[in-house]
Amino acid sequence: MAEAIAFDLALELITKLSSFTLSQIGLCWNVKDDLDDLKSTVSTIKAVLLDAEERSATSQLVKDWLEKLKDVLYDADDLLDDLLVQQQNQADSATLPTDLLGGNRLAKKVRHLFSSSNQLAYGLIMRPKINTIRARLISIGSEAKVFNLVERDRPMETSFMIKKRQLTHSFKDKIIGRGDDKAALLKLVLEFESEENVYIIPIVGFGGLGKTALAQFVYNDETVENHFELMMWVCVSDVFDVKIIVENMIKSATGKAPDQNLEMDQLQKQLREKIGGKKYLLVLDDIWNDEWKKWVSLKELLVGGAKGSRIIVTTRSSKVAKITSKCQPYVLKCLSDNDAWSLFKEIAFEQRSADSTDSGFVEIGKMILERCCGVPLVIRTIAGTLSSKETKSEWLSFKDNELARISQNEGEILPTLKLSYDHLSSHLKHCFAYCRLYPKNHEIDVRTLVQFWIAQGFVKQLNPSQSLEEIGFGYFKDLVERSFFQEVVEGDLMDEMRCKMHDLMHDLAKSVARMESSIIDLNTFASDGGEKCSHISINPALIPLFKGKKLRTLLRYPNKFSPNLSQETWDLIIANCRCLRVLDLHSLGSQMISPSIDKLKHLRYLDLSYNLGLKILPKSICKIQNLLALKLDGCIRLEELPKEIGKLVNLTHIGCKDCFRLTHMPRGIEKLTSLETLSMFVVDKDGSHGGADLSELKLLNNLRGELRIRNLGFVKNAKEEFKAANLKEKQHLRSLVLEWNADIDDEDDDEKSLEDLQPHPNLKELCIRGWRGDAKFPSWLSLLTNLVYMRIYRGNFKQVPSFVQFPCLKGLEIYDCTKLEYMDDNSPKGSQGEPQSFFPSLKHLSLFNCPNMKSWWRTKKPIDDDSNEDDTTVMGTSTMAFPCLSSLEIENCPLTFMPLYPSLNEDLMLSNTSSRPLKQTIKMNINANAPSTSTSSLPLSKLKSFNVHNIEGLDTRTLDECLQHLASLKRLTIRDCKEVDLEGMQWEPLKNLSHLKIDDILKLVSLPIWLQHLVQLKILKIHNCNGLRSLLPVFQHLTFLEEFEVKDCKELELSGAGIQIFQDHTSLRSLWLQNIPKCRHLPEWLQHLTNLQRLYLVNLPNLTSLPDEMRCLTSLEYLQIREIPQLEERCRKDIGADWRKIAHIPNIRLIQALEEGISELQSFYMHKKRALF
């Protein structure tokens, strides 16, 4: 990648050297001529770099020359950075007020430091450094004369760009594992009715998946051949020349190439004559062009076909697919494990079919196959190599010694993938190759990756109206569209986006990055010390051994626990890594940061997050003028940010999420007008810390993502301060959390205070927590029509605003609003309006602990569960329904009157609430008034999970009637329903149920007979059923169970004469027995659980020993014995009486209650999940 780096670096250097700022620096320090000479030298070299880039693909000498040049250009970049930092320091100090200079003596020193004579002295120091770099460049430039490099002003079509790609064929023209893909495409080709005469079908997938082979599979189908009058195949490849494409179409249609001397209009006439009025099939294979105008110029020539004509486009880019067709592309996926093995086996054992059943060959072959990732081209390549190796030892040697090299150098998949890389612009090449620092299969935090790119200077701000981060996300999107990333998961906010790289793409990144980047751990350190690397991801324990001096990136090796970072290691980093742009040392247990960190003056990105013991940051951190991102999220003991943080005027990101001990924000934060991230702003409680007030948020109008403002109840002069925060001008903010004080109950909050915290209408998420003011909400809430999520916690009001017609609202959560009486001031009919305007987008609704909310609407008519009024006609509620609600949670809210919810298709959780809305929903007639629900389906027929707990008025008949609707249900929890008798219910309709929990059902004496019809049931949990005496006779029919859990069942008998309930439960993987007093010993039926992997024995007070049958549990991987002290001694390793019975189990835990509590507390901090990088 040195060739691409060199060109970009040279271009960046010329841009800097041409800037007004460096011109002024040159004049002040008397080095302008030197800088101009350096610019001239760099320009001369840059002129030949495009030619060198092409030559480096075939010449190692040119490649080595570019590596040397890259090193000098990096040094030049660092030198210019030094000049700019020095200039910034002077500008900052020159503007310091006299009172901050500490008197006349210090003021004189400052004036002397930046006097003209001192500037000249600094120039004398820098001049030889500039000239040394220029001399090195001249020397390297002279070496290039032997290569006869040609000057180029712009990129030209290089040999690797116009190289024709060979069509990829499947083994013996057969395709394995693509039958379903072929059938789907045949349906689109032969049966799909399109409004357009010519319908375009894109097939998308990265190189090697078999897009071309699949298109051929369809193209050569006899049915297809008989269906079309004319069939044409054109391999477009990377050069999208319309004239050439038309020539090849004519050649494919006639079998004869047109005259090469024909002009374009003559070729167009021939093509129209050929396809006009005919139903044709055209395959345009391997299109790379993503320029809309070029595609349109071709498409205009193809529209003359008859109705039913088809064009199949194969491409690696979803962007190309979008340009070529309005329809959804057909995305080709990797082969399944079975199909991959079938393909591998057919090739590898072609001449030796007997070996295909040899267990030794099969075992090694399947391990090798894992590395192929289901990509047909890789499978064919490796299987073909193995077909000539006839012994197991050769296969094993190949697996252990050659597989990695084969996957990279064998000449098929990586060169195919690299062709995609070669088509990237130079900045995208940098961005992709940088991803080599991630381990394989790592989930990448996209926003962090973009910030890395920005810190390294890969992101170019050509459009001032866009932030660097927005441009960087554009780069990422370009790479996704070219299949360089996969499994992209998007949240509602950009900072929630995740992705992965396919292993083959990771190999490609490693190949193109070469020595530029490396992952350094104990396994690779000896062979690859990384001394020549510019970017490394490293096991922190190896940092003291690392000898590289030119590092620009140092990332801690991810997903590995590391010991505390010592002061000595900090000193080594600062002494040896002065060129760093990115330093990521998160989650290392650091309690202090080196005060010398300011010597890393080139640093742009610093991640110290999740260092749980870190309390304070050194003042010197505020001298790192280039710093763009400071990540401190999860530093739960951090008490304050540096007081002079306002000096870091280039700072764009301050991450301080979950820094719960921050007492205030430092004054001067208002100077950071480039800030795009400020996770949290903490109001100083009593002013004792001299912290910033809310007015310092006034000019921070570039803030993005989430802003949490804490301690709002402590703000003095709230009306003025809240207005001064200027939240309504922060148009890029996506999420706002307004948090009052959890530790006081202040009911003197002025209602206008909240009125003066008006955010911008672009806001997507709003959370109001702990506001104890007047019952009225602010008027601006109705203006937030873009809201997607609304959360209200611990409010003191009786009514919340009506969110009925918020068009984008997907989630509404209301928690702990103990005085809330109703949700809407209107009557049901008055708030309904048209069905499509009643909560048109709401997907998730949660109402928790609102004990006074008996009705959704403010209605004078009392409603209770004993009313004799027909449930289906109560005040028109048969037509009042959420149109697209997917998930509903109601707990400790006695709602008897609310909109109904027939369309639920995810979760329904009802706890300590009324049964009336459920009854009404079940009795609803589904019609056009419930627009999101099929007219032929029953209410709740799409529901996946149902959790019902202590529902007033819920009896056996009602619950049974409800369950008859739940044909799609997968998870069911029934808890503390006193009037419910499970034996009297019909369970058969729950044919898809996979998870059942029965908790605190007093009437349960035995398992309901209908459970045996639940053939999909995998998990069964029974808790707190003290009336349950036996699992018989039903349990022996539940042979499909994988997990079984019994807790707190005091009368249950598990053992005894003739009880053999587990003999057929070979599917059981997990068994949990807890607080079953009548369990005096584990009976002999235990031996039948031959596939049991996890066994939990908890608080079994009468269990005194383990049976010999424990040794029969050969699959058992984990045994936990908790709160059974009489067993603890018997199970001690090597010395316990029962140790020999369990010695074969790899993981055994003997824990008591106190130990368990401590362990869980530690786990909360040590294993808190975050997507790093």
Image (cartoon, helix red, strand yellow):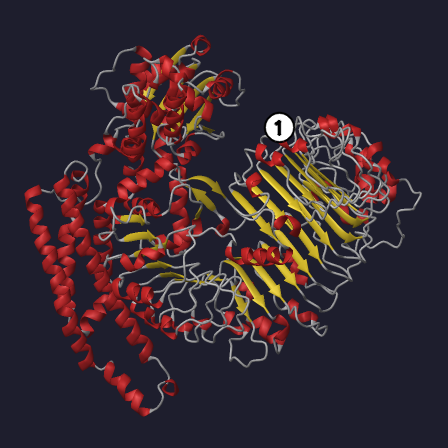
Instruction: Give the residue pinned by disc 1.
Output: 1066
Residue at (37, 13) in percent of width and height: 354
Q: Going 19% across and 52% down the picture, which residue do you hit?
A: 70
Does residue 841 sit above or below 814 in this rendering?
above
Q: Position of residue 1012 (x, y in %)?
A: 74, 27
Relative side of 769 to 80, left or right:
right
Tell me if I can see residue 233 in this picture.
no
In the image, 365 versus 18, the foreground residue is: 365
> Considering the image in quadrants, where does the N terminus appear?
top left
Q: Out of 1133 and 1100, give the one closest to the viewer.
A: 1133
Numbered marks: total = 1
629 and 587: which is toward the camera: 587
**Quadrant in the picture for residue 1103:** top right
Rendered position, 640 above or below 117 = above
Depicted 1089 relative to depicted 633: above or below:
above
Q: Is residue 1053 left or right of residue 166?
A: right
Q: Amino acid at mark 1?
A: Thr
Instruction: Give the farthest residue toward the right.
Output: 868
| Coordinates of residue 197 in the picture (x, y in percent) | 48, 20
Q: In terms of secondary structure, where does tag 1 sit?
A: loop
In front of the other: 349 or 453: 349
Which percent across, then down, holds residue 315?
Answer: 38, 29
Res 414 seen here: yes
Classed neighbour count for the residue bearing mark 1: other residues with Cα under 10 Å, few (<14), some (14–19), many (≥20): some
